[in-house]
Image (spheres, coloured by chain):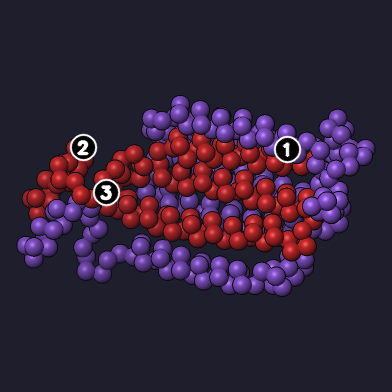
Chain colours: A purple, B red
Amino acid sequence: MSTLLAAAGSLEPAARSYLSPTGQEIVFLLVGVLVLGAAVVSVTTRQLVHAALWLVVALGGLAVEFLLLTAEFVAWVQVLVYLGSVVVLVLFGLMLTRAPIGRSPDADSGNRPAALAVGAASAATLVTLVVDAFRSSWIDLSGPAGTTRLTGEFLFSHWVLPFEALSVLLLAALVGAIVLSRAKGDGTKPRPGNLRTVLTKTKER
Amino acid sequence: MHLAYPAVLAVLLFSVGVYGVLARRNVILVLMSVELMLNAVNLNLVAFDVWLRDTLHAGQALTLFTITVAAAEIGLGLAIVLLVYRTRRTAAVDRVTALGDRHEADDPADAAEEKEQAAA
């Protein structure tokens, strides 16, 4: 444990302090405020399509945060996968379910006050905990930690089996999604589940 | 960089996600909030990976895996949402309450649907 902490260089308060933030910290803070603001707008706005677009801002800002933490490859994967495919899928979903363009007054359900209370409580608890726990921990950002070359090396020398298992999982999810959303060939439309009517119908047949 | 910056940002993002999951009515907005929570966890993983200087880079590898699983999750989730929408004409989580074994329809949409089925 002590070697771990020594390697992390975390217990040395040295010349670093809260009161003199480095340039990276300032940029991180500014982008963090942007990410947080976009996330809050995304979960509170009443315009459904705008929510998806604010999600783009939040996830793109997070990619910038990854870059600031020197995790280059993860940042680009974030841009490609989240901004490129997940948000497009979400927008497709919104349009296929005929989400209203413009304001929809019933975007929030009835338990909004309870949700607000739970969110605020978890934020307060976790912020207190995290600030108290990492009061004297500093990240050493010198040297590359996540360049594409380095990522490739550790991914394909130590993490090959999980990587392959994950590719199988992705394939299974893809096949599952196709099977679920495929239109039935014999023209029967999917019906609301009501066991008794289903049973009587099958008996009649 | 002080470790508290990414940790606090991740915590706040996660709380925003929790609020979104609990407060939203449209399923797709709930899925978006889940994405926010997953991203908060990703930020934590990357920050701790860089902090600990792990030789295996477990944090970053796990981040990449989380991103992949999130992509699979959103694809499968949207397929289910579309199926529910085609069946029940709604994407609101608090309207999809029937699990199947219920005889008497207790909301008007269900009643209309049952009447339609009886007529057919």
Horizontally, residue B93 falls left or right of residue A17, namely left
> What label sits on residue B99 in the rendered view?
3
**Amino acid residing under circle 2:** Asp
Badge 1 marks a residue whose secondary structure is: helix
In the rendered image, the vertical position of residue B46 relative to residue B95, given as above or below? below
Residue at mark 2: chain: B
> What label sits on residue A133 in the rendered view?
1
Q: Quadrant of the N terminus of chain B?
A: top right
Badge 2 marks a residue whose secondary structure is: loop
The alpha-carbon separation of the residues under discs 3 and 1 comes to 44 Å
Residue at screen point 56% across, 29% down? A120
The alpha-carbon separation of the residues under discs 1 and 2 comes to 51 Å
Same chain, marks 3 and 2?
yes
Residue at screen point 75% across, 39% down? A134
- Label 3 crowding class (10 Å Cα cut-off): few <14, some 14-19, many 20+? few
Residue at screen point 35% across, 62% down? A180
Residue at mark 1: chain: A
Residue at screen point 66% across, 69% down? A159
- Label 2 crowding class (10 Å Cα cut-off): few <14, some 14-19, many 20+? few
Horizontally, residue B98 falls left or right of residue B55, namely left
In the rendered image, the vertical position of residue B91 relative to residue A121, given as above or below? below
Q: Are marks 1 and 2 in contact (CB under 8 Å)?
A: no
Q: Is residue A67 visible?
A: no
Q: Which mark's residue is nearer the viewer, 1 or 2? A: 1
Same chain, marks 1 and 2?
no
Q: Which mark's residue is nearer the viewer, 3 or 2? A: 3
The residue identified by callout 2 is B107
Badge 3 marks a residue whose secondary structure is: loop
